[in-house]
Amino acid sequence: MKDGDLDRKNTRWIFAATSFFVVMFLFLAPFNKGLFVGYEITFERPLYIALFCSLVCLTFICVYLYRDWQLASHGDILVALIWIIPISYFIATLEAITSHWAFIEAFVRLGWGVFFVLGYYVARHSAGYNLLLIALIGSGYVIVMFGLLNWFGNAHYKDAVLAERLSSVFQYPNAYAAYLIAIAICALIMVQSSRKKKYRIFHAFMLVPVFLSLLLTLSRGALLVLFIVLIFYLTLLPWKRQLISLMELGIVGIAAFAVYGFAVKTRGQLLENYSQGVTLRGWLLVLGISVIASLVVLGVRLWFGKLDDNKADKRWSPKHLALPVVLVSLGLALYVLILSNFPFSKILPAEIAARLEGVNLQSTSVFLRNTLYEDALRAGADYPVFGAGGGAWSVLSESFKSYPYSSSKVHNFYIETYLESGLFGLIVLMVILCYVFVLLIGQIKKKIRETNDDIRWLIFPVFSIVILGHSLVDFDMSFFYLSSLVFLTLGATAAISNRPIAAIWGKGRVTKAFASGLFLVAIFMIYKCIIALRADEYYRSSMNVLAEEGKYAAYQSAIEQAENLMPGHSQYLLSMAQLNQLMYRETKNESFSKTAEYALNRLKAIDPYNIEAVEINYDLDMDRMNFDRAHEVARRAVALFPWSIGFYENAIELNLRLGSDASLLADKRREYSNEARLLVDEIERRIGRIDKLPETERLMSRGVFDVNDNLQAQFLMLDVMEALQKAERERLSTESKRR
């Protein structure tokens, strides 16, 4: 959307509507748990509302595309290519392991496409460019201050402080840390680019709360990403600006470290005994040090900025790599100190020192992530071309994990993309990212030859690079808010780095057909959003009726209506199956049994790896005293979920029961006892594997996979049964010889 486009009335209202949506999204959306895609029904409603609004916004964009779009630049080509990402996920839904979550993940990718196009067209206009910068950074500052409000006890957002680590709206410290890095670099750029002193002071003032919040997350991976992004940023600046930037960061860093210990102490005092005086004292210290630091940063900027007035010195040259090389060398030296068990506790706050000293190749975090990656790649090898569908790891992990850890996320965006959408989806994603960053390299080459002090254009690529980089070791992209910002800033990056090409099709039938098709997709998905929200209302109604009134008929009616609207929804079917199984257990009414069986059969077809469904299926067959079917379910459960000790317990108990059934032939009873013995051997083999794990992982794993008292009793019963069977065989053999 070029500046001249806004002269047309029909374009102005589209620009205004899309810009308003972007601003509202940036400021409001994060307060819904960052719109986390968590494969639980509690996360769905705000996600559908956000997607609904995004798709409505897409219909406006389609109107603009239909009237004015032509493939006359690289950015226009990206606007067309971006939709292949959701297409790859919709293809994966055809043979998805878990159909409902696969559909939601595909829906989310459609939202990514919307935000990419929004970023591209809003940032093409100077007013939109400035609005996007202000809203992106302003919303970040709001989230930062909200996080500190929770730290100092002024707000009580659920899990804003998680295990004494600050997580703000995201309820996950590592994701919040990645977001803070992006905001910190953006604020630093604004300090350097703002021409008015009051703006420089304001952004410098906010840098202290941002860095303090980053320290309070205690995220090691985020600090590494901060270092790498900072090196990238400095390499784009002339050497004098590099020095000024490092001085400013040093001032802010010292201020944040100075207040860190006091902030931790204040938090502890508030947990023991909340006091407004303690809270006020904490805020006064943070704000006071922030004011002092901002004034010192301004002084540095005014004093040393005069040294940067020579235009010749402002031009970038290869010699300006000297300082980044020195910093990289210092970073490597720090890494060597970490591996050599250097006592950081002597020079750093205890909490930060403990996190650094815990970094090694056998640490829990590193070991778990390496195992996750290997297991996910092994699972992905079974679905190499188009993937296993969105949310695949949330169910496949029970079958493919190497030991009994618990993680519904792979902690690596790119491996997870490969697992969910196969090589096709991964290649599409990487091609689009590379396309944008190739355009960015052209922009960088152009800009480093200039002497303009305004480097605000770096904010968009830096923001996306930080989140995408940190997503190599965590699941930041599973927060729809963060992933939307990534694609919003990627679109804006494409806009500021755009280069014209010869029009391929112009304003002809192809572009109009594409815009029309996209409009129809948007309308259809808006309809699906409405259906999903309506189904969610029925589901919530069914839960309320059951909790408040205990009326089965009203519950069943509401849950059936929800399931009819969303027939592939695992949670609706699970709820139906579970309640009806429990009702059958109490009443022995076959109608409940049949309803539960219907729900379980549907679940087996659309979500075959659902562990809860298998548990309910086993309980239902045991309630029916259908031991043969229960035996098959137990065997299948052990095969599908080899690290769930409860299924071994069920299977051994059932084999013992059948093995002692006098109505069965001796050979059949012996088969059951032999199967029980194989299960015991498998438990011992897996415990042996657990004992080879690092200490923390071993203790955690033995806590969830170990021989309990009931299993011990079963082992003794099996020994007795085998002894009796052996004695019976010997007796029969002796009698046979006498004859």
Image (cartoon, rainbow, N blue to C red):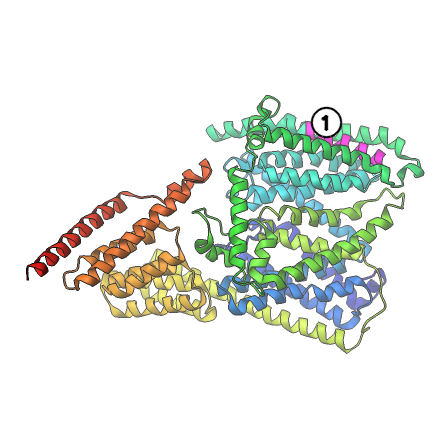
Q: Of helix, strand and loop, which mostly describes the magenta segment?
A: helix
Quadrant of the rendering where the N terminus is positioned: bottom right
Q: Please provide the residue range marked out in magenta.
A: 239-254
Residue sitting at the far bottom: 509
Q: Is residue 463 visible?
A: yes
Determine the residue positioned at 47% across, 38% down.
694
Q: Position of residue 287 (x, y in %)?
A: 66, 30
The residue that mark 1 highlights is 292
Say what amino acid the circle numbered 1 marks.
Answer: Ile
* Picture quadrant of residue 528: bottom right
> Do we see residue 53 in this rendering?
no
Binning the other alpha carbons within 10 Å of mark 1 as few (below 14), some (14 to 19) or many (20 upward) gives some
State the residue at coordinates (27%, 54%): 676
Q: Could you say where residue 379 lies in the image, as x and y percent from the top left?
A: 51, 57
**In the visual, does 6 lie left or right of 720?**
right
Q: Quadrant of the C terminus?
A: bottom left
> How many labels, in total?
1
- Residue 451 lies, with reference to residue 279, above or below; the image says below
Seen from the viewer's position, the closer of residues 399 and 177 is 399
Position above or below: 442 against 206: below
Q: Considering only vertical position in the picture, is 212 above or below 537?
A: above
Residue 670: quarter of image? bottom left
Q: Is residue 48 magenta?
A: no
